[in-house]
Image (cartoon, rainbow, N blue to C red):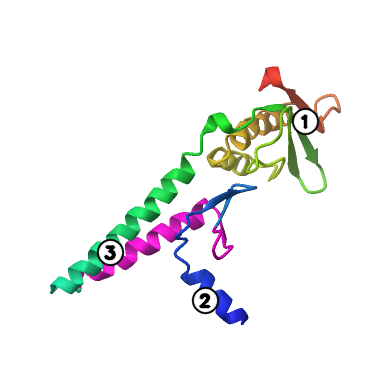
Amino acid sequence: MGDHMGDFVEDCLHSSGLRVEQGSEFRCPVCEARLDVEGVQRWVRAAEKARDEVYSLIEGDGSRLVLEERQREVYRRRKVLYELRDIPRSVAARPEMILVSYDVGKNAYECRIFYEEPRPVWGLERIGVEAELHSILALRAHPDPNVRLASGKVEEFHAFRQHSDGREGYSPQRRVFYQNEI
């Protein structure tokens, strides 16, 4: 039975669309598959690949019907992807406070995002990132606007730590950014 469910999840067309979940994931209500943005993009590319395979087979009217059907599926999947990318930014609650802490043992930052109003369902409260500029800058491409905002604060704290590290024996371990600084 487990093998049957695995095939069902892989073969599911997500015909009911995808729902936004916590942590910038999307869930199919039919097969319960969870996809991130890259997973949705792979799902769209799979439909495009299936459509492109039909181009070489076009000889009769039957092949044209298959091509049109596959093209409609590409359009449907792209529409789902575009709708997920265009989640209204105004719906996202602005953080009230961002706490950035440095963990010496892990050489990483932990960022906690606090909200005055209820946190959005798909919004993150905690982010962990290595204490290197490349990893911090990679967060700028995150789909959640509050994670992108927090990445700027982690970058600012990282630069401050790099500048003050070793001077007068002071190396800050945490920094709080309040709403007026965000």
- Magenta extent: 28-56
In the picture of the structure, the residue carrying the numbered disc 1 is: 165
Front position among marks 1 and 2: 2
What predominant SS class does the magenta segment belong to? Answer: helix
Residue 120 image offset from top left, x and y in percent:
65, 38
Front position among marks 1 and 3: 3
Front position among marks 3 and 2: 3
Label 1 close to label 2 by CB (< 8 Å): no
Please say if 8 is above or below 101: below
- The verdict on residue 49 being magenta is yes
Q: Is residue 129 left or right of residue 45?
A: right
Query: 140 or 122: nearer the eye?
Result: 122
- What is the quadrant of residue 163 in the picture? top right
In the picture of the structure, the residue carrying the numbered disc 3 is: 69
In the rendered structure, which disc, 3 or 2, sits on the residue that comes first in sequence?
Answer: 2
Q: Is residue 113 left or right of residue 79?
A: right
In the picture of the structure, the residue carrying the numbered disc 2 is: 7
Rendered residue at 80%/31% (across/down): 174
Q: Residues within 10 Å of mark 3 (few under 14, many from 20)?
A: few
Amino acid type of disc 3?
Glu
Rendered residue at 39%/55% (across/down): 77
The image quadrant where one finds the N terminus is: bottom right
Q: Secondary structure at mark 3?
A: helix
Query: 179 or 28: nearer the eye?
Result: 28
In the rendered structure, which disc, 1 or 2, sits on the residue that comes first in sequence?
Answer: 2
Label 3 close to label 2 by CB (< 8 Å): no
Residue 48 image offset from top left, x and y in percent:
33, 61
Q: Residues within 10 Å of mark 2 (few under 14, many from 20)?
A: few
Amino acid type of disc 2?
Asp
Rendered residue at 55%/29% (across/down): 90
- The verdict on residue 118 being magenta is no
